[in-house]
Image (cartoon, rainbow, N blue to C red):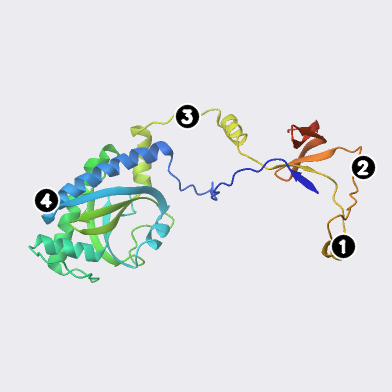
Amino acid sequence: MSTTMTQPAEREVRAYDFRRPTTLAREHSRVLELAFATFARQWGTQLTAKVRVLSQVTCEQVTMHTYDEYAAALPSSTAMVLCSISDVEPRGVIQLPTGAALRWVNAMLGGNRPLPLLDRTFTPIEHALVVGLMNDALEDLQYSLGPLFTNAVRIDAIQYNSQFAQAAPTSELMIVARFAARVGEDVAEATIALPARVLLERLGETNPTVQVDNAKQLLHAQLAQVPVEVSARLASAYVTPASVLGMVVGDVIRLPHPVSRPIQVAAGGEPVGTAAIGAAGSRLAVVVTTAEDKN
């Protein structure tokens, strides 16, 4: 039998693999978010000038994933512009829906009627126009990222199946920026994925972080603030299922716990000491009599 002393608030818990960290540091995430937000504004201006339709691009999220996780989250049929980056083997990716790219090309060629939703490969002319748009986007990207992305970059090819486009090894970490591109009344979701090794090795120089020598003490201090369930336990009694099923109001269950014996105090299911039953105002409480060795 146990008496719960506190009821911690429910919190969302996410598993974290320390052997394969895929979470950006807060300082690094902030720098990248600002850089990609600058790129989004530049790209929107560039699209307005090229497509001749009022355009706006917003950066919605910047995260880090393996390439396999990134590719698996994309539509199976989409336009993936693969870009080779100097000094590294993994390639970057600019991904956008083929239908959106075709509507942009239609507007560039003077079309004034909205195209139906299309999902096909580009013709040679369409391919050349899309490559031109993406080259302009890459220039804006390098300008916006500044010292974070100084590598030479060029477009290699355009793939139309996210599962077959082998831009990087499956376990390669990628910085993924997600955008919402509004061209006229058309809204499309686009992504840019760059090898994390290209950006992270320069983030320390752009936004240096303080080396923490007392990391162990800080970790202990943080863990000490995590809420845990504390309970006061009496010795358990064993009864038969028949006794439980036949239980009625007024029955007495004998517990093998002498009145003189202290009750056990447990935190998170682990014993941490003993206590005697007491009261705090109108509430039942326990008075701690012994504490376990903290080591």
Q: Count residues near mark 2 (Cα–Cα under 10 Å), then give few for <14, some for 14-19, many for 20+.
A: few
**Residue 211 marker:** 3
Q: Residue at (39%, 31%) from the top-left corner?
A: 208
Q: Is residue 12 left or right of residue 261?
A: left
From the image, state whether disc 2 or disc 4 is nearer to you.
2
Q: Residue type at mark 4: give it.
A: Ala
For the residues labelled 2 and 3, the Cα–Cα distance comes to 55 Å
Q: Which residue is mark 2?
A: 258
The image shows residue 106 at horizontal and vertical percentages of 13, 64
1 vs 3, front mark: 1
The C terminus lies in quadrant: top right
**Residue 243: assigned label:** 1
Residue at image position (87%, 53%) is 237
Q: Which callout, 3 or 4, points at the residue further toward the start of the chain? A: 4
Q: CA distance from mark 2 to mark 1?
A: 22 Å
Circles 2, 1 touching at the beta carbon (< 8 Å): no
**Is 124 placed above or below 65 here?**
below
Question: Which residue in the structure is indicated by mark 4?
Answer: 49
SS type, badge 3: loop
Q: Position of residue 248 (x, y in %)?
A: 84, 60
Query: Which three-letter amino acid code belongs to the residue tagged 1?
Result: Ser
Report the Cα–Cα distance between label 4 and label 1. Answer: 82 Å
Whichever of callouts 2 and 1 sits on the residue coming sooner in the sequence is: 1
Mark 4 or 1 closer to N-term? 4
**What count of labels does the image hold?**
4
Query: Is 132 on the left-hand or right-hand side of 291?
Result: left
